Every structure is written in structure tokens, then in C-alpha cells.
């Protein structure tokens, strides 16, 4: 049986109350703040787009194979390139890749010299993680 008393009439909300007027209270504030955010976003994008445009127009005309491979010019000279910056970047990324590969090998590959043939991360989980989990389960 329901909790309503027998014979009690249920009152349903008026459907007209669910409509909202677009220019009242919260709806008006929402509209004004949304328009303000869009205006601020467009104003912030104008300098960004103009710098990007100038970079493409003025820099694109000077970009060539010589600019990518040539050395930078000496002081107060025109021309030159940034070849050594590209070579330096490739060397640094290569060194970082070798270091990270070595760390990956030490961490995840099993060691044949250890009595347990488990990788370092598995041994760390077994020695540190499992006792902590079992202590927390008490």
C-alpha cells in the first residue's frame, strides 16, 4: 500500500511554471556573462592571430634549406641559419633517449644475476607494496 492517504489528491506542478523567460534573473545574467566571455576571448585572440600571421608571412619567405643547414652569422652580419641548433637538438634528444632506454631496461627487464628472475619494478612491488597493502587490510 502506498504512503498516501486514500482519497488524498495529488497536486501536479503547473507546466507554465517550468518555462523561463530569457530576460529574467539568472537567465539574463547567464546571457550577459556568456557574451562577456566570448568578447574577452576574441579580444585575447586578436594579438595571438596577428603575431602568427606576421610569423608566417615574414618568416616563411626567409625559410629555405640554407637557413636550416647554415651556421649562424657573426655579429652584425646578415644571412646565416640555425643548423647548429637543429644538430644540438638531435644530439640532446638522442642522449635522453639512450638514458631513458637504459632506465627502462634496468627497471622492467629481468636480471639474470639476481636469485629471483623478477624485474626491479616487480621486486619493488613485492617487497614494498604487498606488505603495505596487507597492513592496510588489517
Image (spheres, rainbow, N blue to C red):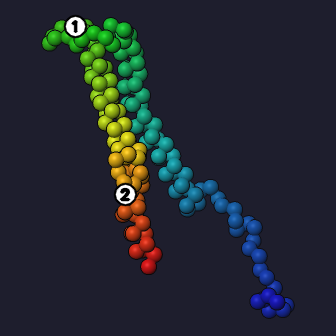
Q: Quadrant of residue 56?
A: top left
Judge depth for marks 2 and 1 and give the one in front.
2
Tag 2: Cα neighbours inside 10 Å, few (<14), some, or many (≥20)? Answer: few
Q: Which residue is mark 2?
A: 124
Label 2 to label 1: alpha-carbon separation: 58 Å
At x 76%, y 89%, the residue is 3
At x 38%, y 30%, the residue is 47
- Above or below, 71 relative to 100: above
Q: Quick check: marks 2 and 1 in contact, CB under 8 Å?
A: no
Tag 1: Cα neighbours inside 10 Å, few (<14), some, or many (≥20)? Answer: few
Q: Can you give x and y, in whole percent of width and height, for residue 136 in the image?
A: 42, 74
Q: Can you give x and y, in whole percent of width and height, for residue 130 in the image?
A: 42, 66
At x 37%, y 46%, the residue is 111
Mark toward the start of the polypeptide (2 vs 1): 1
Q: Can you give x and y, in whole percent of width and height, for residue 120 in the image?
A: 37, 51
Question: Is residue 26 rendered to the left or right of residue 89?
Answer: right
Label 2: which secondary element:
helix
Quick one: quadrant of the N terminus? bottom right
Q: Nearer the viewer, residue 50 or 127?
A: 127
- Above or below, 124 relative to 75: below
Q: Can you give x and y, in whole percent of width and height, for residue 62 in the image?
A: 35, 10
At x 36%, y 63%, the residue is 128
Q: Quadrant of residue 129?
A: bottom left
Q: Which residue is mark 1?
A: 78
Q: Nearer the viewer, residue 28 or 90?
A: 90
Question: Is residue 23 rendered to the left or right of residue 121?
Answer: right
Q: Is residue 121 visible?
A: no
Q: Is residue 136 visible?
A: yes
- Above or below, 67 relative to 130: above
- Above or below, 38 relative to 126: above
Quick one: quadrant of the C terminus? bottom left
Label 1: which secondary element:
loop
Amino acid at each position: 500500500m502506498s504512503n498516501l492517504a486514500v482519497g488524498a489528491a495529488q497536486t501536479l506542478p503547473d507546466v507554465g511554471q517550468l518555462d523561463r523567460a530569457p530576460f529574467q534573473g539568472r537567465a539574463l545574467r547567464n546571457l550577459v556573462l556568456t557574451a562577456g566571455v566570448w568578447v574577452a576571448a576574441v579580444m585575447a585572440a586578436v594579438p595571438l592571430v596577428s603575431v602568427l600571421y606576421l610569423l608566417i608571412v615574414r618568416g616563411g619567405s626567409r625559410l629555405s634549406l640554407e637557413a636550416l643547414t647554415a651556421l649562424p652569422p657573426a655579429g652584425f652580419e646578415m644571412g646565416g641559419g640555425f643548423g647548429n641548433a637543429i644538430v644540438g637538438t638531435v644530439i640532446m634528444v638522442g642522449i635522453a633517449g639512450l638514458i631513458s632506454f637504459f632506465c627502462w631496461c634496468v627497471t622492467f627487464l629481468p636480471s639474470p644475476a639476481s636469485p629471483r628472475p623478477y624485474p626491479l619494478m616487480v621486486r619493488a612491488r613485492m617487497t614494498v607494496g604487498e606488505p603495505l597493502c596487507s597492513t592496510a587490510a588489517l
